Image (cartoon, helix red, strand yellow):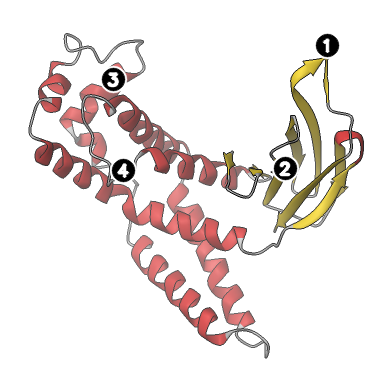
Amino acid sequence: MSANTAATIDYEYPLHERVRTYLRLEHLLQMLAPQRPVDATNYARYFSALFAILELCERSDVRTDVQKDLDRRKTQLQLWAQHPDVNQDQLAATSTRVRDALAAIQPMTRVGSSLKQDRLLGVIRQRFAMPGGTCNFDVPQLHYWLHQPQELRTADCARWWKELEVLLSSLQLELQLLRGQAIFRDVVAPAGLLQETTEALSLLRLQVPADIPAYPVISGHKTRFSIRFLRYTPVDGKASYEENVTFSLALCP
């Protein structure tokens, strides 16, 4: 969830477990920005994101999922190329990006496997789940690392990032193409509730006016979803927002 400059709040809801993992990785990626120097003030946020990414990649075969999705995009783009009204220049540029991403991701083996062999990361990760477990007496290696020149820490972070860069850049491309498949349309949730049955979907995107004192709670699966608006601050003990809500909705297949 993120507020934008057009006085709306953007929400997204995945209707497929694969897309749920993609969105979580994208969220973590924002905290792992390689251009942000890691030091004693922000190392906890950085390593929390890094270890969460590794854990998500260990739980599911994200690399294979992204490769399959990009393969489908490639076939889709080839079909679109036969349409007379398509923008051929834009289509060619997108096709090149997809082909390049596929060429980079196909040779990859298990994502992050070499990072599991990194001695410093191994020690930090063991202690990270413990409340306050990164104190200098718990992990003196980390304390030492944080007192090294910034150039050394930046070089280490760049090396760790390189292990994930191909996967995460391919994932970002897939999400960009997924989101671009649907345009926003204005809809109304009567008395704060919208329910729809649709064709198979992967992702819901909402743009809700920021002046509405409520937030959407979304549930559903690939062919059916429900959006109910709840008050951020309950009134007379009731959390339901029972006014009509007009917002923008995009249904991404």
- Mark 2 against mark 4, which lies toward the viewer? 2
Judge depth for marks 4 and 1 and give the one in front.
Answer: 1
Q: Position of residue 183 (x, y in %)?
A: 70, 62
Residue at 26% over, 25% down: 41
Judge left or right: residue 56 versus residue 88. left
Closer to the chain start, of discs 2 and 4, is 4
Q: Residues within 10 Å of mark 1 (few under 14, many from 20)?
A: few
For residue 126, which numbered disc appears in the image? 3
Location of residue 181 (image quadrant): bottom right
Q: Amino acid at mark 4?
A: Gly
> Between disc 4 and disc 1, whose residue precedes?
4
Q: Identify whether 93 is placed above or below 178.
A: below
Mark number for residue 209? 2
Identified by mark 1, the residue type is Gly
- Give the CA distance from mark 3 to mark 4: 16 Å
Mark earlier in primary sequence (3, 1): 3
Q: Is residue 90 above or below residue 173?
A: below
Instruction: Locate residue 174, reporting x and y percent.
Output: 52, 59
